[in-house]
Image: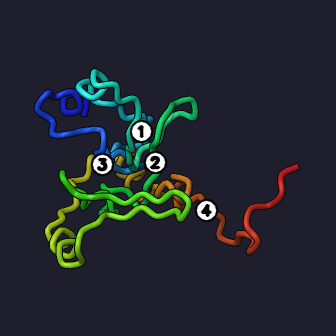
Amino acid sequence: MAARIDDPGLDIDASCVIVLQNAGPQGAPGMPEWGQLPIPQKLLKQGVRDMVRISDARMSGTSYGACVLHVAPESYVGGPLAFVRDGDLIELDVPARKLNLLIGAEEMARRRAAWVAPVPKFERGYGKLYLRHVSQADKGCDFDFLEPVDAPEDGEPEIH
C-alpha cells in the first residue's frame, strides 16, 4: 500500500475514493489499525487534505478524515470490497447509511464467479484456529466458541 499510494504514476485525483482490501480480522489478520489511509503525496502537493477512504480495517479514534471502516464481511472472505476494481464508481450516502459499488448486476455476477478465496495464511496452530473461528467486525471479531450458548434474548446483561 505504501509503495502504491505514493507512486507518481497512480491514476488518482481528489474526486477518487481510496479502497484498502484484505485488512480485516482474517485478511490482515487481526484487523490492524491500517484504516488511516494516507493521502497520496502528489495530491497533498496539490493541497488535497482529505478524501473518502474505505476499508475493512480499523483505525484509532484520534485519526482524521472521511473514512468508512470495519466493512463487513471483509474482502478476504468474499465481502463486497473484494469486488472493487480501479475505476469503479462508489456511492457513499452517509445520512442514508448506504455504501454501494455502482456496477451492473451482470458485472457483479462475473466478478463473484471469478473470485478465488486467498490461500489461508496458516495451516496449523493458533493461526489456523483464529482464522477458522474469528467473527467479522460487525460481530466484534470474537471467537465463535466464546459466544454464550444461552444468551439473553434482550442482548447483553446490564453492567453495574
Judging by the rendered image, the residue that carries numbered circle 1 is 35
Callouts 4 and 1 close, C-beta under 8 Å = no
- C-alpha gap between disc 4 and disc 1: 27 Å
- As helix, strand or loop, the secondary structure at mark 1 comes to loop
- C-alpha gap between disc 1 and disc 2: 7 Å
* Residue at figure coordinates x 30%, y 48% from the top left: 21
Q: Position of residue 77 (x, y in %)?
A: 32, 60
- As helix, strand or loop, the secondary structure at mark 2 comes to loop
Disc number lying in front (4 or 1) = 1
Amino acid type at mark 1: Gly
* Residue at figure coordinates x 20%, y 54% from the top left: 119
Callouts 2 and 3 close, C-beta under 8 Å = no
Amino acid type at mark 2: Leu
* Residue at figure coordinates x 54%, y 61% from the top left: 145
Which numbered tag is attached to residue 147? 4
- Residue farthest top in this picture: 45
Disc number lying in front (2 or 4) = 2
- C-alpha gap between disc 2 and disc 3: 11 Å
